[in-house]
């Protein structure tokens, strides 16, 4: 929702938005983690994926419609995380697969009116963002300290984000103060603190369950758009919400043996 308000409204360039988002997340987490010990062990891949996700998402979002972008992004996330779970030995039961299919149907129904033939480069970037987010999520499952791990990832991703901005600064117009504020909020709260919560949850659920749960994000974003951006409630959103949330509930509240962590 914050990205839509900032980038969709042309308030800030994608490069600067990405840099501010990553940097502000790093600053907040450095304040929270005491002492802020930085270890490179296991962090290079996660930090690279965090940067790749944030950068690809921002640059792709500028030229992609919301519906097409959501379908590409979450399609790539689903494939990446479910394949990762299968490779790690997870074997979801039939109820999980049925819930996943129902939730996917809800997402497709929600975004269907906005589907359009996407620009090839931006489509590839959004698919890349989905794969990067999937890998970033999978890399967090074995972290014993989610807050410290997230802080490390944001700090290590900061030089990459700054370098990206320096390379693209001449291509972007003058930033708007409101756009920069949205980027700070996106990085410090919904990304920095939000990803700590996400890493904390990942330790207790299977990769497949985590993938299915993320299908609620477009619904949450749509509801947020209604509450904060003045967007209109529609019958399509209501029906899509029932399908998606019902499918996620079916997958989440299945017998424990289906969602058990691989031994």
Image (cartoon, rainbow, N blue to C red):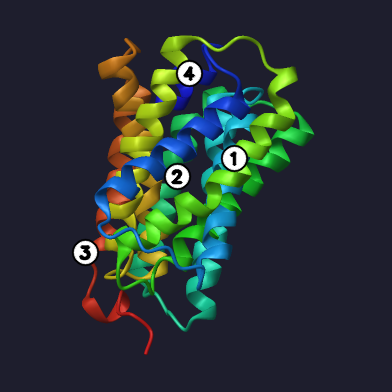
Residue on which disc 4 sits: 6
Identify the mark nearer the N-term, 4 or 3.
4
Q: Nearer the viewer, residue 10 or 22?
A: 22
Identify the mark nearer the N-term, 1 or 4.
4
Q: Which mark is residue 105?
A: 2
Asked if the residue under mark 2 is in contact with the one under mark 1, i.e. CB atoms within 8 Å, the reply is: no
Q: Residues within 10 Å of mark 1 (few under 14, many from 20)?
A: many
The vertical placement of 240 against 93, above or below, is above
Res. 172 in view: yes
Q: Which mark is residue 161?
A: 1
Res. 1 in view: no
Q: Residues within 10 Å of mark 4 (few under 14, many from 20)?
A: many
Residue on which disc 3 sits: 253
Q: Residues within 10 Å of mark 3 (few under 14, many from 20)?
A: some
The vertical placement of 146 against 18, above or below, is below
Point out the residue furthest to the right here.
120
| Helix, strand or loop for disc 2 | helix
On screen, residue 200 versus residue 178, left or right, reads left
Q: Position of residue 144 (x, y in %)?
A: 31, 73
Q: Quadrant of the N terminus?
A: top left
Identify the mark nearer the N-term, 3 or 2.
2
Q: Position of residue 86 (x, y in %)?
A: 51, 76
Identify the mark nearer the N-term, 1 or 2.
2
Q: Nearer the viewer, residue 44 or 96?
A: 44
Residue located at (68% from left, 40% from top): 125
| Helix, strand or loop for disc 3 | loop
């Amino acid at each position: 929702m914050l990205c839509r308000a900032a980038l969709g409204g042309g308030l800030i360039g994608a490069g600067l938005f990405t840099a501010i988002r990553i940097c502000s997340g790093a600053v907040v987490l450095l304040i929270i983690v005491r002492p802020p010990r930085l270890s490179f062990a296991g962090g290079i891949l996660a930090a690279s994926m965090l940067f790749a996700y944030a950068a690809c998402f921002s640059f792709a979002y500028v030229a992609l419609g919301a519906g097409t972008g959501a379908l590409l992004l979450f399609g790539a996330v689903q494939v990446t995380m479910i394949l990762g779970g299968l490779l790690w030995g997870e074997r979801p039961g039939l109820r999980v697969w049925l819930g996943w299919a129902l939730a996917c149907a809800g997402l497709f129904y929600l975004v269907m009116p906005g589907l359009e033939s996407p620009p090839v480069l931006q489509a590839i970037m959004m698919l890349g963002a989905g794969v990067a987010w999937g890998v970033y999520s999978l890399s967090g499952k074995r972290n014993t300290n989610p807050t410290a791990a997230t802080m490390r990832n944001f700090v290590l991703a900061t030089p990459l984000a700054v370098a990206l901005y320096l390379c693209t600064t001449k291509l972007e117009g003058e930033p708007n103060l409101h756009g920069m504020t949205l980027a700070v909020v996106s990085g410090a709260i919904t990304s920095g603190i939000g990803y700590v919560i996400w890493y904390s949850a990942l330790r207790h659920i299977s990769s497949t369950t985590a993938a299915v749960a993320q299908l609620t994000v477009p619904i949450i974003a749509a509801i947020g758009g209604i509450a904060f951006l003045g967007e209109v409630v529609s019958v399509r959103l209501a029906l899509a919400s029932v399908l998606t949330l019902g499918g996620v509930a079916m997958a989440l509240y299945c017998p424990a043996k289906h969602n058990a962590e691989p031994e």
